[in-house]
């Protein structure tokens, strides 16, 4: 199996799990309106037109490699991770190799990705748990993946959708978090809240594409500090340019 996925950076190494809401309201708030859902779908359509190519830069050839690479992608670029995993996956071919590795050597082998000490501990602990509880196989459910050290909903969503074709949620990294709030698709203050808001507004068949589309948009136009709003295909649907202009004018 060949898997390729845009990793991006995690907002944190481990995320709290959330339950998918089944009631008609959340904390007394009204349901998302039909107009809001139509606007969200329009945003996805425009982004797909703007970025028809598939951004698949975090490379892996198995579910185990994808799990390890996604854990390593926290606070790191895809290019950094790929440089490291190119050699790493030649040296560590099986889950046992990671589980039984000398921790200091493993830390040295992933040094370039940053936060290497914590990431090495997460990778090794996750692989040991795979051996102890899952017969050495990467599990195929959200509930089971969230039991692995260093794995939160973002990592679990990526592994499920890219490795197994299972879509249970939306992977929210720093790009998705920022852009969803700028577009007023969410006012959530945590990745979990933003994920919930996006899931309420978008049809499930688009969930697996949101992460890649928002990451590409965030890297090319919707930059964190100086977004290129004049060039953005979403300008007519986005409240951020007007908000930014009014803030500048008030100074």
Image (cartoon, rainbow, N blue to C red):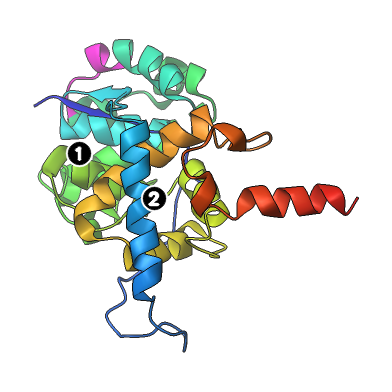
Q: Secondary structure at mark 2?
A: helix
The x and y percentages for residue 146 are 30, 56
Residue 94 in which image quadrant: top left
Q: Secondary structure at mark 1?
A: helix
Which image quadrant: the N terminus?
top left
For this rendering, which residue is in front, 73 or 30? 30
Q: Is 196 on the left-hand or right-hand side of 56?
A: right
Q: Is 74 on the left-hand or right-hand side of 133?
A: right
Q: Residues within 10 Å of mark 1 (few under 14, many from 20)?
A: many
Which residue is rendered at x = 35% and y = 53% of the image?
Answer: 42
Q: Where is 172 relative to 77, above or below?
A: below
Q: Which residue is mark 1?
A: 162
Q: CA distance from mark 2 to mark 1?
A: 23 Å
Q: Is 90 contained in the magenta span?
A: yes
Q: Which residues are magenta?
A: 88-94
Q: Residues within 10 Å of mark 2 (few under 14, many from 20)?
A: some
The x and y percentages for residue 229 are 60, 38
Q: Which residue is mark 2?
A: 43
The x and y percentages for residue 40 are 38, 58
Residue positioned most to the bottom: 28
Q: Is 167 on the left-hand or right-hand side of 32?
A: left
Q: Where is 231 relative to 134, above or below?
A: above
The x and y percentages for residue 112 are 50, 17
Which residue is rendered at x = 45% and y = 23% of the image?
Answer: 107
Question: Pointers 2 and 1 in contact (CB under 8 A)?
Answer: no
- The image shows a total of numbered marks equal to 2
Which residue is rendered at x = 13% and y = 49% of the image?
Answer: 134
Q: Is 200 contained in the magenta span?
A: no
Residue 16 in which image quadrant: bottom left
Label whose residue precedes the other's in the sequence (2 or 1): 2
Q: Where is 121 relative to 238, above or below?
A: above
Residue positioned most to the right: 251
């Amino acid at each position: 199996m060949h898997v390729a996925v845009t990793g991006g950076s995690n907002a944190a190494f481990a995320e709290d799990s959330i339950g998918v809401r089944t009631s008609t309201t959340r904390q007394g708030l009204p349901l998302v309106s039909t107009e809001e859902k139509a606007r969200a779908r329009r945003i996805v359509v425009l982004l797909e037109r703007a970025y028809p190519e598939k951004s698949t830069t975090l490379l892996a050839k198995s579910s185990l490699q994808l799990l390890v690479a996604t854990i390593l992608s926290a606070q790191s670029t895809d290019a950094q991770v790929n440089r490291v995993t190119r050699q790493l996956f030649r040296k560590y071919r099986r889950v046992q190799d990671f589980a039984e590795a000398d921790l200091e050597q493993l830390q040295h082998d992933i040094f370039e990705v940053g936060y290497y000490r914590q990431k090495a501990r997460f990778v090794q602990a996750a692989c040991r748990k795979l051996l102890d509880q899952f017969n050495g196989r990467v599990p195929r459910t959200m509930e089971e993946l969230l039991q692995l050290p260093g794995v939160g909903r973002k990592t679990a969503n990526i592994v499920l959708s890219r490795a197994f074709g299972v879509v249970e949620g939306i992977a929210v990294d720093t790009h998705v978090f920022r852009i969803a709030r700028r577009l007023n698709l969410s006012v959530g203050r945590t990745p979990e809240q933003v994920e919930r808001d996006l899931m309420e507004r978008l049809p499930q068949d688009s969930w697996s594409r949101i992460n890649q589309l928002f990451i590409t948009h965030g890297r090319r136009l919707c930059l964190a500090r100086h977004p290129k709003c004049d060039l953005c295909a979403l300008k007519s649907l986005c409240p951020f340019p007007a908000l930014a202009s009014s803030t500048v004018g008030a100074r």
